[in-house]
Image (tube, rainbow, N blue to C red):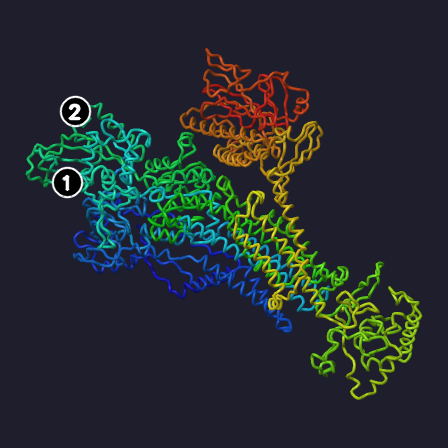
Amino acid sequence: MSEGQNGGTAVPEEQKVAKSLSKKLKNALSRKKSSKDTSRADKLRQEIGFTEHTWPAEKVYEYYGATPENGLSSAQVLQNREKYGWNRLTPPVVIPWWVKYLEQYANVFMILLLFGGVLCFVAYGIDQSDPTNLYLGVVLFLVVFISATFSYLTEAKADSVMEGFKKLVPKKCKVLRDGNISIIEAEELVPGDVVEFGDGDQVPADMRVVIANDIKVDNSSLTGEAEPQEREPDLQMGPNGKPVTVPLEAQNLMFYTTIVVGGSGRGIVIGTGDKTVMGQIAGLAAESGNDEATQFQIEVDIFIKIISVIAILIGITFILIGIFVAGASAIEMIVFAIGIIVGTVPEGLLVTLTVSLALSAKHMYAKNVLVKGMPSVENLGSTTVIASDKTGTLTQNRMTVQHAWYDGQLVTVPAARNLPQLKAAMRPGVIKGPKYDTEAPTWQALQRVATLCNNSRFVLTDADDEDKPALNLAEEVQAPDFNLLGLTCTGDASESALIKCVQLIRDVSEYHAANPKLHEIKFNSTNKWQLSIHKPEDPSAKNPLMVFKGAPERVINRCTKILINGEEIPMTDEWRKKYQDAYENLGAMGERVLGFAMKNLDLPMDYAFTNKPEPNFPTEDLTFVGLMSLIDPPREGVPEAVAKCKRARIKVYMVTGDHPITALAIAKQVGIIDQDKWDAGKALVVKGDDIREWMEISDPVERQNKWDWALDHEQIVFARVSPAHKLLIVENCQRRGENVAVTGDGVNDAPALKKANTGIAMGISGKDVSKEAADMILMDDNFASIVNGVEEGRVIFDNLKKSIAYTLASKFPEQIPFLLFVVLSFPPAISTILILSIDLGCDMLPAISLAYEPKEADIMDRPPRNPDVERLVSRRLISFSYFQIGLIQTSAGFLAFMSVFNDYGYEWGNMIGRGISWERGPLICKPQIAASGNLWAADCHFGCEEPQKTFGGQTTLYGQAADEFRFCKDGCPIPFNGTADPFIEFTQYGFRGIAYDDTTFGNKDTAIQATCGRTCSWYAGLSDQLKDRFIAANDEFVRRVNGGVVDPINPFNYGGDAAYALYLSRAEANMFDQYCNLPNADQYGFAGRGLVNDGEFGEQGSFYWWNGQVQYFANLDSQKSVLFTGQTAYFAAVVVARTADLLICKTRKESLFTQGLRNRVLNAGFFTMILFVCLISYVPFLRIVWTTRPLFVLYMFIGVPYAMFIFVYDEIRKMIIRNYPKGWVFETHIGNNTLADNRGVISHCFECHYSSYTTIVVLQCCNKKTESPDMVSTNSSNNWDCLVDQLNTIDALGDVYEKKKRLRRIIVQLDALYEGIRDDVRSDPMVGCIDPVDVKRVLDKAKQDEKDIQIAEDELEDTERRVPVNLEVVGDIDDLLGGLTLGDGDNDGPSAHVQETAQRRPVTGRRYKKVVRASGKQRQHLPARQDIDDDTGSVDGDHAGMPTRDDDDTTDEEAKRYAVPASGRTRLTVDIPIQHEVIAQAQRRDPIMAGHDRGSSGSTHAHCGVRHVQNTDGVSSSYDSDDSITSPAAGTIRTVVTNTK
């Protein structure tokens, strides 16, 4: 024990809150939590370093200042407490609830929406005439508040892990201090205290046992061992003859919070508080919380950030364009910013996701899975590894009799719950193999001993209800629904299992009553047996009966006879051997075995039996009756659940503190380990000692390699592991990219449950600590419920993708109108409040309803989701939602919008450039007469703005007038024929226009004032010459009009001063002269008045245009009403089109006709969508809030054709997906062969260049015929070609471990590839140029290669021979050395420099061929095609290790294809010692992998990286780089490796 043991010092609450709040605010946007104290984390992952248990007791007393007689003195107690602290756990920092709630607002979406709400209030503050911005701001704030509150309430879970540990802490204990025994609070204990304990006590600290009287301790909460463990003062000896010193396995240690279930004793406290095993677990549970977000949360956060960045960038970019290019005002740009934010951010997405997850959690609760954290629902569906505790999770956590051996036969003992179930189990054929026979006399004797030599009894009363009558067990067992195995019993687990086994045959209490006990010797750890003496129930019996039970080896040693078929016969060596075989077989199955014996004592019934100081009766010369074996049996349904996990490609690991043999037996029973996998070396049992050895490795790379080696096995059991080991298992699985779910029910599972991606606790048997640390709780403690959870998780992922696809499809029709608003100044086709109406009104229920979609048929036959490939929001989904369905919906909306404008006389050409000022001023247009005679508007622009209320520091007449009398507010009325108003911008012939040159106004601003700012001052400033010129121009125009000589389309095209014809008429000049001589004449007119839009102005002769006609009065309300009507029609058309979008999102590949409309919630969503459109369109008070207008009924159906198109388009798309599951394939010919014909060549010749943005892989082949590369396209859904290429280059690796690791990864990918395409093959067996038969053949070959490497390694370990080998190597020296792994030790051959070069420079992307000429007389793994002399065993040198083929088999075409120049070779000869007899095994490569045909003697081959090889005797052949080349025990190999340049 270290000196620096710390107590539980409390952290001030203020510091906790401040620290937590500071951290949260600092990481509000990044959502990243600060790193832990790594040194503390590392220490927690190491086992407690107790050494006191290896010391003599006297040294322990001395070390802590105590004595056996007096314990600690009061002064020493204070000194030790000062040094070691209090015996309590350090509480973790707790984040206040309000900080957690505020965290919900740190979401980027929330911040953007809050910013949008603030902008709405700012806009309303600037212009309070329009309450729409006020309503919108309130709605945005409500959306944020509701979303944050709902997320907090649904996601909040109790962070009270330490509270669960506090419940485990003992309250009081007996301690020896100052020579007196006293009872104190457990937290007052200090190291060195001498504590006394007895049956039923809870261990108050980690203690070294110094006195033990038959002590048994229940360690199941720590180690998972169901059987109570014996405790003695001394260490027990291990199988190796050395003491077992590992703390958790040491026999003289007792641990904090465990329970003493038998005996009494005394111990010295050596660990308190955090420096106990339980304290370590508590620290790990608090420290190892999985701070990393789930994959689901990561993907959602990434999507949110991307969308937010897009919204911000679009907003900033186009605001700048609007202000500096389009000349928009600040208020207009604020409105635009609000629209972009609302249009880009899917406001309802977070609520939809949260509600969908909550609904899924509700579904899971109906399946007995309680979800504590919402994201855990989907995360469980992505699980790739389930690391399950054994005790209480896979097993029932109660010992059960499994087998019995009597009469020389091993029989099965059914574990029945009641008598009807036992009778059913005893029927022939129900249970395989022999069963016990209740009529057999030996079984009856075995039953008698198991019943009488047993102190366990059933607890038949209810401790919580004393008035409730006790159970009548004899009657209850007759009921088919009664569970005898679930009853609580007194005594230890083994005795409880025995009485549950025999109770159904004969009532235990009745049996004991009929055979009264006369004497007994209880079990103790020294004897390892117990006996009891009874008066037999047979009235004729004259002598008492002794029954004997204990460890089989102790029992058999006391027996001289054995009971066979009810008769006692001598115990011969033959029977001892049969007993030993049965004992070993039962032990090998992981079962605990008990031996049973009896003896009829030759003593009277009233004999005074005693065992002190020694028994006064014989305990030898017994009759052996039989054996019974016990095991903690698997739960019902677990094997089926494990099988489902296998089908779903989920690996199930057993992680337990139990014995490896027991763990392996249970693993085989439930299917975690298959016998064929075990035999093939693909299954593994990792012991805690192995992990300890790995953790002692100082090199982190080597330590990681050890973990990788173990985790590369397909099926794994971890046994005898500590809580720290469990955490390491989880962490290493996560390091390898696994999504780990951990199940457990004990305290020892808490750290791993917290660290895992998904922690799953048991609801009934689970400790509070494990429940609080977990993300989910199994309410029925059934491992099989996990499979339901995985299935539900996969379903919710599918449905969430559907919801997101549906939700995102509305973003395009929401964003495009606002982008056009700024880029083209097009009137906004939709308002921000209508965008919110789509997101929160129309889409919310339909999006949530997709969570109710039923599962797809193959949901549990798919492999776990690969987050790198199948993301929640992928580019494909965005492309489909935004640019396909979203574009169609946008088209529907704009058709409706333009239809409304067209019907009101506004053509689309007249709307471009008018959007920003549409609601500020009325349009004035030049009326035109079409060829059909219809009147239409052309060259529409805006006129003059609203008059100024103040000018020059004085209030104008316009400003003094009441609102109802401001007749020029929206534009002055046009004078009728024969009338005039000299101060307005119109004459009876239309708009005066804006014209200027150097002879008139000189600049645009002066010209604008001549039209819009006409005052007496302006008139007085005109020169007489200019007045006369304007009047003359007007007279000329009037004359032409009256004479009918003007062009009706363009009446001012006659030249001269026509541009100034409407500036001033003679009548207007007279009126100026008259009015300007009146008092206050300086206030007449509209001083300082400008244009509505400074960037444009109306054409000369334009009139007001609204309602499709020329108008003399401005009607801005009508113009706004048209915009609102168009926006309403746009909204309605998009919603109608989205009904089809909702339909197509019901399935991902299946046709809607197959899926049907069974989702009632979704069907209701259709109704709500249409109802919402109708309500806001036709209900008056709703129209005011939403600024909508009632639609003509035909406008409501404009979106119907688009909806039909969406439906048909998607049905066709899905049909193509079903028919072409691997996509389209474009084939290009190579020579005269198609790509499909040259798959073998391509797989060997091409380099794969992948692009993450395309589904096409471009392959480049080194074509020797044309000397220029051909480009070939093929389907890239699988990495078939590159996998084969990698497989062919594996032998270039020198490190055998690296070979195995690389090969294992390739096999996994090939297996996934084969599974993926096996069921997708059409009538044409080629799918994407990949034949599943080829994939299967290559997969099998790769697995055989892996097995061969393992065999070679195993053989290498069995031999110490080193054979010198001569290698003659032809090729590039540097490249060559990179491909060789050179030997070491004696006769090493090459220099150390060469060896180092060879080991550190692996060959990549090149292949070397090897050929062997071997001599010798031993046959070691020779290939099939060899000539072997049966007499001598020698190998023909011309064919040794080489597949051959006739010369005539090589065609001219092949010779051309494979021919290479014979130049460019470098020869190097080295002698390399080879460890082990060389295995002359040239494995035949499949052509699909090698990409070429085998050569024959004398032929020359080279092919795109395949190297020409020639043997030293002239025999030529081609071999793959991963051919295994070895030699006999003696002799020399000469290998020629040619690197073709």
In percent of width and height, residue 1422 lies at: 49, 20
Do we see residue 1003 in this rendering? no
Image quarter in which the C terminus is found: top right
Tell me which corner region of the image, top left, top right, bottom left or bottom right, holds residue 1018: bottom right
In percent of width and height, residue 950 lies at: 72, 80
Query: Is 447 placed left or right of 1042 in the picture?
Result: left
Query: Is 1004 placed left or right of 1120 in the picture?
Result: right
Q: Nearer the viewer, residue 291 or 494?
A: 494
Mark 1 Cα-neighbour bin, 10 Å: few <14, some 14–19, many ≥20: some
Do we see residue 662 in this rendering? yes
The residue positioned 76% from the left and 77% from the top of the image is: 1088
Q: Nearer the viewer, residue 414 or 714?
A: 414
Badge 1 is on which residue? 521
Q: Which residue lies furthest to the top in this view?
A: 1431
- Mark 2–mark 1 CB contact (< 8 Å): no
Q: Residue furthest bottom?
A: 1079
Q: Is residue 1468 above or below residue 365?
A: above
Q: Is residue 148 above or below residue 1511?
A: below
Tell me which corner region of the image, top left, top right, bottom left or bottom right, holds residue 580: top left
Looking at the rendered structure, the secondary structure element under dot 1 is: strand
Tell me which corner region of the image, top left, top right, bottom left or bottom right, holds residue 1050: bottom right
In percent of width and height, residue 1145 lies at: 58, 49
Badge 2 is on which residue? 570
- Looking at marks 2 and 1 on the same chain, the residue that comes earlier in the sequence is marked by 1
The type of residue carrying mark 2 is: Pro
In percent of width and height, residue 570 lies at: 16, 24
Looking at the rendered structure, the secondary structure element under dot 2 is: strand
